Amino acid sequence: MAKITSLQNDRVRRVQALQRSTRRRLREGLMVAEGLRLLQELARAELPISQLFWTPEFAAEDAGRAVLATLETRSEASIAVSPEVMAAIADTETPQGILAVLPIPTLPPRAGSFGLIPDGVRDPGNLGTMLRTAWATGVSRVWLPPGTVDFTNPKVVRAGMGAHFCVPMAKATWEQIAADIAGTSVWLAEAERGTPYDAVDWRGPVTLIVGGEAEGAGPEARALAGAAGYVTIPMAEGVDSLNAAMAAAVLLFDAARQRRGNSARHNNAPVE
């Protein structure tokens, strides 16, 4: 079986460029996903794959063989590489032996009119966690405004744990966002003022804005929310805020609870 062993191979260099450069990813419309768990999610999502890279050691394992059998049927190219090449093209320090280059998904909005805007979120781990939470809570669409870290950043993709393959998300200008969310109730998370989150009616068409870690939401987001559109998470005395990903999780899961209806409360009642 032929495999790539040279770090100077053109395919190797292209993957490295995609890992490093937001501009390159967006220009080519490609992103990179790596690791067994993430690739298993990709297999379930049934999205097309441009190139699949794997090591013979990975393919020799039962889990590796199973995921490869599925992914190879949708990949334009399936390429064996040496462990040294995998280490060079992966973004992780200890790669698991599989990596895919795929078109950035363009998914239609999911039903429900339940939107999320992470505004000025610059930490890749926080954004990835927010996207994973959006997936778990049934968010129908995520808009990524200017100033938010690139959602195809390798660290964001790993932290999202498959959200990129299932939740519609895209970069957008504030003008585009304003047009898209017109007619929805817009709520902006704020640390020290606003309506307590458990007093908000999340059941209709709604959009949640969560500001970034350092400066919070910007003026464009505040204009969309308006003077009455602030939501807050009451906390114990002496605690002034949560990080962006944690705040988003609290708010999104409460919204999801309401949107499921009263039956969810009954189904989750403790058994005596």
Image: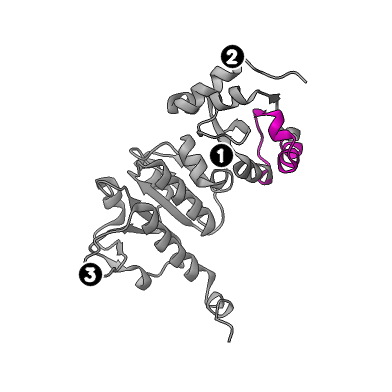
Q: Which residues are magenta?
A: 44-71
In the drawing, does residue 36 fall left or right of residue 30? right
Q: Amino acid at mark 2?
A: Asp
Pointers 1 and 2 in contact (C-beta within 8 Å): no
Sequence-earlier tag: 1 or 2: 2
The relative height of residue 140 versus residue 202 in the rendered view (above or below) is above
Residue placed at 26% from the left, 46% from the top? Answer: 214
- Real-space CA distance between mark 2 and mark 3, rounded to the nearest whole angstrom: 57 Å
Please state the horizontal and vertical placement of residue 74, each as a whole percent of the image. Answer: 72, 34
Sequence-earlier tag: 1 or 3: 1
Q: Amino acid at mark 3?
A: Glu
The relative height of residue 66 versus residue 197 in the rendered view (above or below) is above
- Real-space CA distance between mark 1 and mark 3, rounded to the nearest whole angstrom: 44 Å
In the drawing, does residue 6 fall left or right of residue 231? right
Farthest residue, direction bottom: 272
- Which residue is labeled 1 in the image? 106
Please state the horizontal and vertical placement of residue 245, each as a whole percent of the image. Answer: 39, 53
Please state the horizontal and vertical placement of residue 242, each as a whole percent of the image. Answer: 32, 58
Residue placed at 56% from the left, 39% from the top? Answer: 106
Q: What colouring method underlies this structural image?
A: one colour
- Which residue is labeled 3 in the image? 237
In the drawing, does residue 93 fall left or right of residue 48? left
- Which residue is labeled 2 in the image? 10
- Real-space CA distance between mark 1 and mark 2, rounded to the nearest whole angstrom: 27 Å
Is there any visible trace of residue 152 in the rendered image?
Answer: no
Please state the horizontal and vertical placement of residue 115, each as a whole percent of the image. Answer: 45, 54
Residue placed at 74% from the left, 18% from the top? Answer: 2
Sequence-earlier tag: 2 or 3: 2
Q: In which quadrant of the rendered view does residue 72 lie?
A: top right
Q: Amino acid at mark 1?
A: Thr
Pointer 2: residues within 10 angstroms few (<14), some, or many (20+)?
Answer: few
Of 157 and 172, which appears nearest the observer? 157
